[in-house]
Amino acid sequence: MKLRKLAIADASMERSPGQEGEIFTGNLVDERHGGPVTIGYGRWGAGSSLSETMAVDDIMIVLKGRLSVTTEDGTVTAGPGEIVYMPKGEKVTIRAHEEDAVTAYVTYPHWREAQG
């Protein structure tokens, strides 16, 4: 894999696996590119939510809007410029607030392989 500059305009957004809400992801680097991590962007419709047990370690950077992440230990809310770390095995519910949200993410290992 060579040096790359990544932008949201480069992402082909697809409905996030395993849900029917207004949550979309667009991988820009993943197992197909030979790197050790998945890197991409997410788009969350206002009020959308997703509950799952994390199959990978996931770092989510909020670029626009606000998201809340709830676990058995409590809830954190993140806005633009803030980062949420969700470790593998953690049961989470991620919820967008009253406006759409945009995130960037990095997972280790590749989430598509872990979900398969």
Image (tube, rainbow, N blue to C red):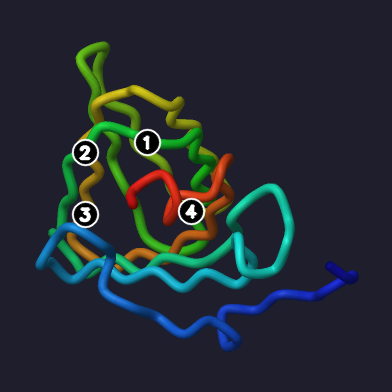
Instruction: Looking at the picture, tell me which residue is in the foreground, 32 or 102.
Output: 32
The image quadrant of residue 42 is bottom left
Residue linked to disc 1: 55
Q: Earlier in the sequence, mark 4 or mark 1?
A: 1
Q: Are marks 4 and 3 in contact (CB under 8 Å)?
A: no
Q: Position of residue 45 (x, y in %)?
A: 22, 69
Instruction: Return the residue at label 2.
Output: 52
- Label 4 to label 3: alpha-carbon separation: 12 Å
Q: Which three-letter amino acid code belongs to the residue tagged 3?
A: His
Which x, y percent locates residue 56? 45, 36
Residue 44 horizontal/vertical position (percent): 28, 65
Q: Residue at x 52, y 69 (%)?
A: 27
Residue underneath mark 4:
62
| CA distance separating discs 2 and 3 | 18 Å
Quick one: SS at disc 3?
loop
Labels 2 and 3 touching (C-beta < 8 A): no
Q: Is residue 75 left or right of residue 27?
A: left
Counting residues from the start of the chain, the first of labels 4 and 3 encountered is 4
Disc 1 and disc 2 in contact, CB within 8 angstroms: yes
Q: Looking at the image, which residue sits at the far right?
A: 3
Q: Of discs 4 and 1, which sits in the foreground? A: 1
Please give left or right for residue 3 compared with residue 20 in the image: right
Q: Is residue 94 left or right of residue 37?
A: left
